[in-house]
Image: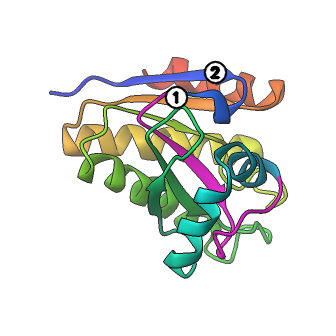
Amino acid sequence: MSRLSMRAILGDITLQDTDAIVNAANTSLLGGGGVDGAIHRAAGKGLLDECRKLGGCPAGEARITGAYNLRCRYVIHTPGPVYRGGSFGEEAILKSSYVNSMNLVMRHSLRSVSFPAISTGVYAYPKAEACDIAIETVAGFILENNYDVEVYFVLFDRESYGLYLDKLKSVV
């Protein structure tokens, strides 16, 4: 039986040395603002060149690339949903982003992964709801697949960090 090893960290996801970091990407995979822009800037031109070859990625799906100048080995790119009030399938898309990212983690036999708070920046997903979805979905994946992996939720702001700490206390 796998154990749940999930932690919240207040910090910069580009500095994580886990096997993979997850990029809250846009569907073009060609960089943007927030976490996406920070990852592309820190990784360097090689990441953009590899992402160009992928031809984009629909919201809720995930793609994996090398990490280039980052400390991790891989970057998993997943576009989350743009929040439009909650009645346009946003929850299902956000869950898919986490499940499909975890599928890549397992398929590549990775032992550690760092996630940002997907879709909570410019995509405006409510932070508390997104936190619940992230932690419940990842925990469910780990338990259903009996997969041992260390998961870090790397949060950039104190509000999100507090939400993840509180939620993790009730799950782990």
On the image, numbered disc 1 is attached to which residue? 152
Amino acid carrying label 1: it is: Tyr
On the image, numbered disc 2 is attached to which residue? 9
Residue 50 location in percent, x, y?
53, 67
Q: Please say if 14 is above or below 122.
A: above
Amino acid carrying label 2: it is: Ile
Judge whether residue 22 is colored magenta. yes
Residue in front for this viewpoint, 14 or 147: 14
User: Label 1: how many residues lie within 10 Å, few (<14), some (14-19) or many (20+)?
Assistant: many
User: Label 2: how many residues lie within 10 Å, few (<14), some (14-19) or many (20+)?
Assistant: some
Residue drawn at (81%, 50%) of the image? 34
Q: Secondary structure at mark 2?
A: strand
- Magenta region: which residues? 17-33
Specify whether residue 94 is in view: no
Indicate which disc, 1 or 2, sits on the residue closer to the N terminus. Answer: 2
Residue 154 location in percent, x, y?
64, 30
- Could you tell whether 82 is left or right of 109 in the image? right
